Image: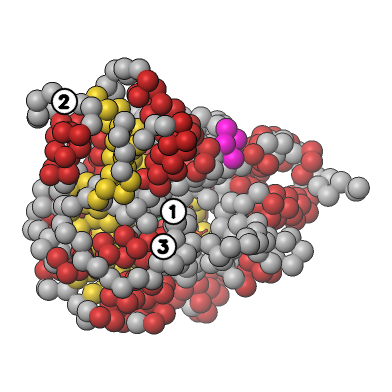
Amino acid sequence: MPNRYPLLGKIDNPEDLKKLKEEDLVPVCSELRDFIIDSVSCNPGHFGASLGVVELTVALHYVFNTPYDRLVWDVGHQAYAHKILTGRKSVFHTNRKYKGISGFPNRKESPFDSFGVGHSSTSISAALGMAIAAQKKGEQRQVIAVIGDGSLTGGMAFEGLNNAGANNANILVILNDNNMAIDPNVGALKEYLLDITTSKTYNKFKTDVWNALGKFENLGPKARRLVQKLEGSVKSALLHRSNLFESLNLRYFGPVDGHDVEYLVKILNDLKDIPGPKLLHCITTKGKGYKPAEENQTAFHAPGLFDRETGKQIVVKHEKPLPPKYQDVFGETLLELAIMNPKIYGITPAMPSGCSMNILMDKLPERAFDVGIAEQHAVTFAAGMAAEGDIPFCNIYSSFSQRAYDQIIHDVALQNLPVVMCLDRAGIVGEDGATHHGVFDMAFLRPIPNITIVSPLNEVELRNMMFTAQLDNQGPWVIRYPRGRGELTDWKKPFRALAKGKGQLVREGRDLAILCIGPIGNEAIKAANELSLIDIEVAIYDMRFLKPLDEELLEEVRLRFQKIITLEDGALAGGFGSAVLEYFCSKANMPQVVRLGIPDKFIEHGSPTELYRECGIDKEGIKATAFKLVNENIRVK
Ligand SMILES: Cc1ncc(C[n+]2csc(CCOP(=O)(O)OP(=O)(O)O)c2C)c(N)n1
Ligand SMILES: CC(=O)[C@@H](O)[C@H](O)COP(=O)(O)O
Ligand SMILES: [Mg+2]
């Protein structure tokens, strides 16, 4: 079979790339694009974003002396071309797989991955830190941050820009503007960028000035700065308002075509010689070069398996209907509740399709808000609505909610405002790995006063928790549930209000009790059913509430069982098992307790099944622990 990648096959690192002539970069980009399409169509991962920065990635590694010059990607979901060009082409088939390479830049993985990412809006801050560190050491290092227009809606990006403009450090911020986040980008900033991009007068002026610059090849940086200054003031006049970035003292260049690799090489070479903080505004297309991805950019953000020729997503057939995804149960239930209760609103920080709030958005657009990648703002915006008597359901992926910890404490709990925080992707998420596992929320939320924290065993429980939370309306609720599918195909039952702080016995037993919280409890039920075959009878208690804990039920368990396992899809340190231990150790003759959950380490990427097995919280791990506890004395963990 002819080699599909004759040029790319010879590129193992940027040194190999630099040996090519500039005109060879166009076919290199084409082969690199094909390689990404071939790889991701059969090994699912992020897709459209990487296709959108193929030319930018090639130009950056061609012009700059990476890894000495630092390249920091924002979010890092677009860094597949970067990984393929920096020594990982031969292992790229292990991307996001257990013990394979990470789906995001990772300092442990390569010196070319100058900073670990996964959560958005961090690149400018990290790059500025590196640039100032280099400046203090007298190193002539270039530092480049590549940030998307979506990530620029994150407040931290502006903290970085604000500080960058106040330092004369050598930092180049490349704004990769494709008008998309995962869903279409939102906010006033998006409109502003669109204005710059489409302003005819301004663009013509830009091109003229740029060409003039090019004619004076021997212009020293000083003279260029003069020309840039001139351009800045004329540009402001033309745009009838100052350029946002220049008003923050970053020299703004662009907008330029982010898919013209030869033009990018020229500009980046020019920018290399201009000192101080700079921003290059690149216009790209998410999914560039693969029509199905260009035409359906949200679906191809992370498409799963797809047919490379047709772009059709490959769905595995199942004889029986599958249970729904928890996010869809949330989305459909939120719509039902919003129809029942006019006080209910939905708020999402840029994840409308990810958390299925788009169901409410489509049906009742005036009742749902996508606030951009702005978790801190989302929580306090919700608090403001709650302060006015509304009942906002603020949905944030558990790991992204880490961004809004003080807002949850300071703006919501301290004021005891009835915000319903729905933490999707709580627990192990799988292939997104350590940055995205939502394993810390129970431990970091439990100490906060006034807060009610629940996690459902299944879809019916999730619906009833959402229903009860909006009825309660006495203070903040947190409802945490995992990525992926639930347990029940017949889940749309009539709502039933739950008694606050009450758990439930879901399986009788004799030899030991397993106390669990959340859908991980279904692993315990499966384990108990199999243990019963060898005459080990395990009782299962679904505690439902992490806070307030059902102490009456715990007392019943304490009086009936001397051997107890706690089970959670969350960090052991300070989590559900810790809360149970705190209760038991306040009583006489404490039972023997073994806690199962996420150990004190970061869990890498892999399938949820592989990662649950690694943490001992899958059915087999639970069976082994129960068998050992019943048959011998194990030290309390
Ligand atoms: C703090 C945080 N919130 C949300 C996300 C989820 N997320 C990943 S990529 C993305 C959109 C990023 O848009 P942009 O920066 O424009 O990159 P593009 O995909 O358009 O290349 C979002 C919201 C995240 N990774 N981190
Ligand atoms: C890169 C990023 O943060 C998002 O794309 C995230 O990977 C989405 O996760 P889900 O696939 O669980 O929605
Ligand atoms: Mg974008």
Residue 590 - label = 2
Q: Is residue 95 above or below residue 77?
A: above
Residue 585 located left or right of residue 41: left
Majority secondary structure in the magenta region: loop
Chain part drawn in magenta: 97-101
- For label 3, the crowd category at 10 Å Cα-Cα, with few meaning under 14, some 14 to 19 and many 20 or more, is many
In the rendered structure, are the residues bearing label 1 and label 3 in contact, judged by CB atoms less than 8 Å apart?
A: yes
Q: Is residue 19 visible?
A: yes
Q: Is residue 574 above or below residue 39?
A: above
In the rendered structure, are the residues bearing label 2 and label 3 in contact, judged by CB atoms less than 8 Å apart?
A: no
| Image location (x, y in percent) of residue 234 | 42, 71
Q: Look at the numbered disc 2 and give the secondary structure of its residue.
A: loop
211, 143: nearer the viewer: 143
536, 424: nearer the viewer: 536
Where, by quadrant of the figure, is residue 508 drawn?
Answer: top left
- For label 2, the crowd category at 10 Å Cα-Cα, with few meaning under 14, some 14 to 19 and many 20 or more, is some
Residue 483 - label = 1
| Image location (x, y in percent) of residue 25 | 74, 51
The amino acid type of the residue labelled 1 equals Arg
Q: Closer to the camera: disc 2 or disc 3?
A: 2
Q: Residue at x 14, y 65 (%)?
A: 472
Q: Look at the numbered disc 1 and give the secondary structure of its residue.
A: loop
Which residue does the numbered mark 3 point to in the structure image? Answer: 327
- Distance from disc 1 to disc 3, alpha carbons, whole Å, reads 7 Å
Q: Is residue 635 above or below residue 380?
A: above
- Distance from disc 1 to disc 2, alpha carbons, whole Å, reads 35 Å
Q: Residue at x 50, y 43 (%)?
A: 608
Q: Residue at x 57, y 32 (%)?
A: 99
| Image location (x, y in percent) of residue 207 | 57, 69
The amino acid type of the residue labelled 3 equals Gln
